[in-house]
């Protein structure tokens, strides 16, 4: 009996499936006016099982210095102390706390840390599972002033849309 | 004179285009960044020839109006416009999959001065001194 209980317990506390990020990810941002670009470098760990959301989690970190707006001067300006201050805050981090199902997709609640400011955010995402590979997609909007990125007003709007696509493999 | 000016424009455009293509090759080899998909060789030649032809027409229009003062005014305008044209190069937004966009201005900004350089180089072969000044007869 004890053996049986131990055996069952091992399965009850089995972690959610671990996914490895491939290098085909895309982190794209757009804003009003001519604002837009990508972040080229992202690292992290994803443990996700759509049947075990409680055991699932995301820990992702984007390298701020990998920003590319298509223009060298804009890139330098974006990394400067006036905006992202890449030297002082080299990463944009997201650490999940809770994942729930929402219709056909999911909502992840977690801490978003940008420019040294940490805020709890709820982000929607979809999950396409193809067996040994899968793709996470998320589109959401953040207010840059909430994270003190750039001065309020000006040519760059407050609302920045992010589109993240992360292909993963087991 | 107009036909000579058009020939000057065409040939200086070709010369500027060849110089630009050589510079592009040297630059991409030295910095290890290839922007030939953005600044395409055919486009470089076309823009240089069109630029110099427009300059020729501008010279002819100025000559009709200013006569012996044409050269100094034309040279000044051509150089000012060449400097002004680099603003577009500095502010250009490249496709996001292009690496090292900060190296792009270093490629294209010098190219913006090649048409003026080629035009000034070949101009003495096409425009007689008598047409520039009243006092010297060719």
Image: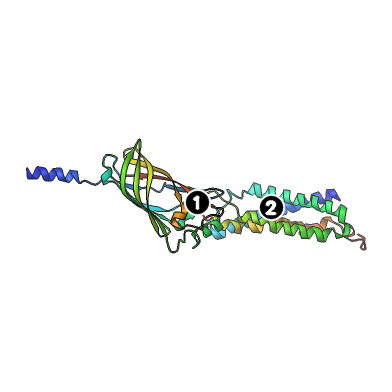
Image position, residue B13 (x, y; %): 73, 52
Whether residue A160 sits left or right of residue A96 in the image: it is right
Residue under circle 1?
A158
Task: Give me the C-alpha separation between circle 2 and circle 1.
Answer: 44 Å
Please, which colouring scheme is shown? rainbow
Q: Quadrant of residue A170?
A: top left
Q: Are marks 2 and 1 on the same chain?
A: no
Name the mark nearer the viewer: 2 or 1. 1
Whether residue B31 sits left or right of residue A48 in the image: it is right
Name the element at disc 1: loop
Residue under circle 2?
B17
Using the image as rendered, state which of residue A133 and residue A86 is in the foreground. A86
Q: Identify the residue shown where x is 26% and y is 45%.
A: A54
Q: Identify the residue shown where x is 73% and y is 48%.
A: B50
Using the image as rendered, state which of residue B102 and residue A156 is in the foreground. A156
Q: How many marks?
A: 2
């Amino acid at each position: 009996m004890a053996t049986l209980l131990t055996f069952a317990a091992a399965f009850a506390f089995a972690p959610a499936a671990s996914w490895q990020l491939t290098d085909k990810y895309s982190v794209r941002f757009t804003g009003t006016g001519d604002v837009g670009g990508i972040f080229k470098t992202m690292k992290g760990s994803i443990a996700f099982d759509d049947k075990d959301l409680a055991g699932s989690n995301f820990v992702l970190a984007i390298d701020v210095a990998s920003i590319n707006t298509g223009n060298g001067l804009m890139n330098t300006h974006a990394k400067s102390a006036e905006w992202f201050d890449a030297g002082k805050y080299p990463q944009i981090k997201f650490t999940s706390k809770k994942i729930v199902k929402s219709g056909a997709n999911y909502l992840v609640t977690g801490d978003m840390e940008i420019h040294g400011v940490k805020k709890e955010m709820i982000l929607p995402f979809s999950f396409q599972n193809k067996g040994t590979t899968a793709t996470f997609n998320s589109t959401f909007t953040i207010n840059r002033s909430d994270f003190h990125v750039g001065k309020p007003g000006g040519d760059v709007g407050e609302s920045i849309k992010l589109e993240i696509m992360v292909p993963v493999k087991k | 004179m107009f036909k000579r000016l058009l020939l000057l424009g065409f040939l200086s455009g070709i010369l500027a285009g060849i110089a630009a293509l050589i510079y592009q090759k040297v630059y991409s080899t030295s910095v290890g960044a290839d922007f030939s998909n953005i600044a395409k060789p055919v486009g470089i030649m076309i823009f240089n020839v069109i630029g110099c032809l427009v300059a020729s027409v501008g010279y002819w229009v100025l000559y009709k109006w200013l006569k012996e003062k044409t050269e100094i005014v034309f040279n000044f305008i051509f150089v000012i416009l060449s400097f002004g044209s680099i603003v577009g190069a500095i502010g250009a937004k490249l496709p996001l999959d292009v690496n090292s966009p900060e190296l792009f201005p270093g490629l294209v900004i010098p190219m913006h001065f090649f048409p003026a350089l080629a035009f000034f180089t070949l101009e003495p072969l096409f425009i007689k001194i008598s047409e520039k000044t009243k006092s010297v007869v060719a």
